[in-house]
Amino acid sequence: MKKTVNLSHVRTVNQRAILDAIFQNGESSKAQLARMLDMSKPSMADNVAALLQIGIIKEMGEGACSSGGGRKPTLLRFCDDFKYIIVMDFQYQHSYFCLSDLRGTIINQFTIQQTPTADLNSWITMCINAVSMLMASQGITHQDLATIAVSAPGILNDSDKNYIVSSKYGDFNVGQMEEQLSAAFPVPVLIKNSTNASVLGEWCCGGGQDKRHLAFISCGQGVGAGILLNGRLYEGSHLAAGEIGFSITPETLNSKNASLENRICIDSVLKQLNDGRQDPPLTFPDMIRQYQTSDPEIIGMVDLISTELGCAVCNLLSVIDCELVIIGGDYLAFEERLIPGIQKIVDSHAAIPVPVIPSRLGEKASVLGLIATSREFYFKQICTRSAGDEQ
């Protein structure tokens, strides 16, 4: 039994290495792959045959002969459209939906505005209809899907179905939504915290591509951090790592706004700005417009936010000692003042200062992180299944 298990594991590892190499390097021959991966030709042939049988790679004709002549090698290519991924990214007042292939090319996408306090049935109906529309747009069924991937705010512990989402999102219930999606579309449904998805997106496709230790901080309607340590997402024992929005200080301990998120989230900031105001209530778009005209009250509030975030970043750096901090979220509307303010505090107070940069992926960071997570999940699934079937 032990020998069988070990053989299955070796096949899984070899097939995954081959699949990753073809995905990352484009068209390759078996001989090239064998040299690259230091794998014997018989092992390469067996594992390539298994991947060809699955259909996730295909033969693409002949390449050039080697300098010594001989037969032209058959080239292998990854099949981008072998399966598809549907992504749902839930924001405070809108939800983004897209269909991508395994490569990560977005084929169709749209955004739906919603009321944060919408009832759960409305949320679920919206999601099921969105998935159906995306599949219909490409003429595919659920059998063509690798996963449905969802990012949402809050503490999302998928293993024990313990989902903690702020009451500001109304009747939003990730657990029940997952159950309904799985019932309507029998494919794996992956759930990720929004900032965790974003740090993966920045690492794969954004400003953190060359880093091994990285933090992504989202600030706006909520405040949270996604943490990457040694090239792996760190989520903690309860999948609650990075919840810096719950940070407190001695000065605010007995205040109703004790936590960082309650002090600087959009709703709290607007409440402070509107306190005693006689005019129509200030909205966040109003705040952005007044910031652009250098309104002193708004400038002062942005400076306060940058100070709070600068302190939070310093505290986080003292624990995880990362190489780079990326800031994302709604408050990037104030980027040219916010980021230097955070950096100044980090340079002055962090034990080892690191660069603080704005996200250039924007809301796409979490989307691209979900696609990468889905692809990793699917590659692992098919290689494990294929290796097991051969026993």
Image (cartoon, rainbow, N blue to C red):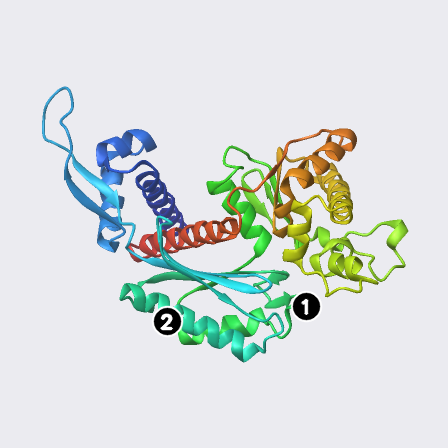
Q: Quadrant of the C terminus?
A: bottom left
**According to the image, label 1 marks what residue?**
168
Q: Quadrant of the N terminus?
A: bottom left
| Res 109 → quadrant | bottom left
Examine the rendered structure and indicate whether residue 128 appears above or below residue 96.
below
Distance from the alpha carbon under mark 1 to that under mark 2:
28 Å
**Mark toward the start of the polypeptide (1 vs 2):** 2
CB under 8 Å between callouts 1 and 2? no
Q: Amino acid at mark 1?
A: Lys
**According to the image, label 2 marks what residue?**
132
* 369 with respect to 309 (left or right): left
Q: Residues within 10 Å of mark 2 (few under 14, many from 20)?
A: some
Examine the rendered structure and indicate whether residue 156 appears above or below residue 298.
below
Judging depth in this view, the residue of 85 and 342 nearest the camera is: 342
Q: Amino acid at mark 2?
A: Ser
The mark found on residue 122 in the picture is none
Rendered location of residue 4, percent (x, y): 36, 51
Q: Residue furthest top?
A: 67
Q: Is residue 340 visible?
A: yes
* 15 with respect to 276 (left or right): left
Judging depth in this view, the residue of 185 and 49 nearest the camera is: 185
Q: Secondary structure at mark 2?
A: helix
Residue under the image location 57 percent in, 51 percent down: 196
Q: Is residue 238 visible?
A: no
* 200 with respect to 70 (left or right): right
Q: Residues within 10 Å of mark 1 (few under 14, many from 20)?
A: few
